[in-house]
Amino acid sequence: MAYQTSVLLSGPSMLTLWHTRHSNYFLDQNGEQLVCVREHAKQINDIQPYKDLTMIATASKDTTAKLFDTQSFKHLKTYKTERPVNSASISPIRDHVVLGGGQEAMDVTTTSTRIGKFDARFFHLVFEEEFGRVKGHFGPINSVVFSPDGKRYVLRGYHSDRFNPCGTKLYKSDGYIPH
């Protein structure tokens, strides 16, 4: 019988690597727990894999995003911010990680966009250094993702924009693509 390895959020701040007989863990409770890591201090908001599945990026309310090796679950890198991180995505063509987040949504109405830090933030994958920011959101960024070709990325947040009620913004590597 074939086995599959799965990554699950097994608690608010805990990742577990499981080895199961079926692709759906919940069908086979006899799976073997391989690794359990608690690298985040608060809730994990997002998990995204690298294109070749050798790494995953996690985003957390503890104001960090972290990079893990998927074979050993070894913690490789930490990208630190001052605000909760809702999403993190690894570029498929460059040594870049983009993070999105910002101040908690319930506190947004009492804060200016400058103070809320609703910027997409770019970090060097290896050196963990921030090298750029993209402004333009008026609330927390809920999701970020690179396109498969790595030439674009999408930032998703909630905005009350009559032309773009979903708040999705598409960017090319050389700037914003207006909709």
Image (spheres, rainbow, N blue to C red):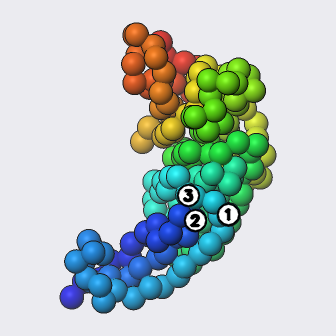
Distance (Cα) linking label 1 and label 2: 6 Å
Relative side of 34 to 166, left or right? right
Mark 2 touching mark 3, by CB under 8 A?
A: yes
Answer with left or right where residue 123 lies relative to residue 6: right
Mark 1 lies on a secondary structure that is: loop
Q: Residues within 10 Å of mark 2 (few under 14, many from 20)?
A: some
**Residue annotated with mark 2:** 13
- Say what amino acid the circle numbered 2 marks: Ser
Q: Secondary structure at mark 3?
A: strand
The answer to whether residue 126 is above or below residue 136 is below
Query: Where, by quadrant of the figure, is residue 7 drawn?
Result: bottom left
* 157 shown above or below 20: above
- Residue at left offset 78%, top offset 46%: 129
Q: Residue at x 39, y 19 (%)?
A: 165
Neighbourhood count class around disc 1 (C-alpha, 10 Å): few under 14, some 14–19, many 20 upward: some
Find numbered disc 2 in the image and state the secondary structure of the residue it sits on: loop
Q: Determine the CA span between mark 2 and mark 3.
A: 5 Å
Could you tell me which quadrant the N terminus lies in? bottom left
Q: Quadrant of the C terminus?
A: top left
Between 175 and 164, the one nearer to me in the picture = 164
Mark 3 Cα shell of 10 Å, populated few (<14), some (14-19), many (≥20) = many
- Residue tagged by mark 3? 44
What amino acid is labelled 1 in the image?
Ala
* Residue drawn at x 39%, y 72% as measured from the top left: 6
| Image height of 121 relative to 91, above or below | above
Along the line of sight, the residue nearer the viewer: 147 or 40? 40
Tag 3: residue type? Ile
Q: Which residue position is annotated with label 1?
A: 41
Q: Are marks 1 and 2 in contact (CB under 8 Å)?
A: yes
Res 79 label = none
Q: x and y percent of residue 54 in the render?
A: 51, 65
Query: Going from the N terminus, do you reach mark 2 or mark 3 first?
Result: 2
